[in-house]
Image: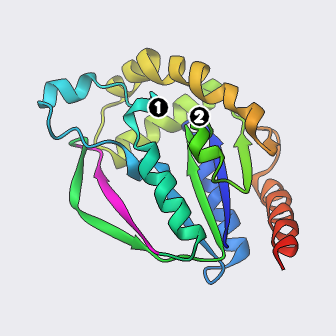
Amino acid sequence: MGLVVGICGGSGSGKTTLARLLIERLGPDRAVGLAFDAYYCDQGHLTPDQRAEVNYDHPDSLDGPLIAEHLGDLAAGRPAAVPVYDFATHTRTAEVDVLEPRPVVVVEGILLLAYPELRARLDLSVFRQCPEDVRFERRVERDVAERGRTPESVAVQFAATVKPMHDEFVDPTAEHADIVVPYEEDLHDACTRVATAVEALSARQI
């Protein structure tokens, strides 16, 4: 069975960077990455105006059962057909990305530890802490550059849903993490800590 490592934290906290560093440290033949962002529920049945009103920072906006199924497949050595999500239209495309299994699966997402069925799939869980002002600045930069948003719309969404959902559903899940990475800790140092824990878990499987 493969190991599943989950990296959680608020939007813009650095969790994606930490996941990338860990995969690079372990090597592409040994580790593969999976983003929970690919599993947003399809909103194609709604009008564009209705889609804009959906709270995409609430756990209900993500397909927890599907990613739990895929994590189980990957851990068992089976490929997974990962959805391709279009953030501009809030819909899933007709395409899928076939992800091949590796000995270590590194999955990351803001709400990863909010679902009991996902926590049960994780062999190691990590939570990255980050101050709110830093997360906000990074969120604006990312959504404008990658998701076709305006700074104003990002600010409105952050105040309306991102912050309150973070406070209610994301930040409290740090208590479920095996490793908590404080903001002051360099991500390369954190990667070393996580990689050491992965190696220890791998040794137990031999």
Residue 84 shown in magenta: yes
Residue 54 shown in magenta: no
157 is higher (above) or lower (below) than 31: above
Q: CA distance from mark 1 to mark 2?
A: 7 Å
The residue carrying mark 1 is: 59
199 is higher (above) or lower (below) than 123: below
Where residue 150 sits in the image (x, y, percent)?
30, 32
Is disc 1 placed on a helix, strand or loop?
Answer: helix
- The answer to whether residue 131 is visible is no
- For the residue pair 68 and 99, the one nearer the viewer reads as 68
Q: Residue at x 48, y 49 (%)?
A: 36
- Dot label at residue 114: 2
Q: Quadrant of the C terminus?
A: bottom right
Where residue 174 sits in the image (x, y, percent)?
73, 33
Q: Main secondary structure of the magenta part?
A: strand
Is disc 2 placed on a helix, strand or loop?
Answer: helix
Using a 10 Å C-alpha cutoff, classify the residue at mark 1 as few (fewer than 14 neighbours), some (14 to 19) or many (20 or more). some
CB contact under 8 Å: marks 1 and 2: yes
158 is higher (above) or lower (below) than 184: above
Q: Quadrant of residue 25?
A: bottom right
Residue type (three-letter) at the residue carrying disc 1: Pro
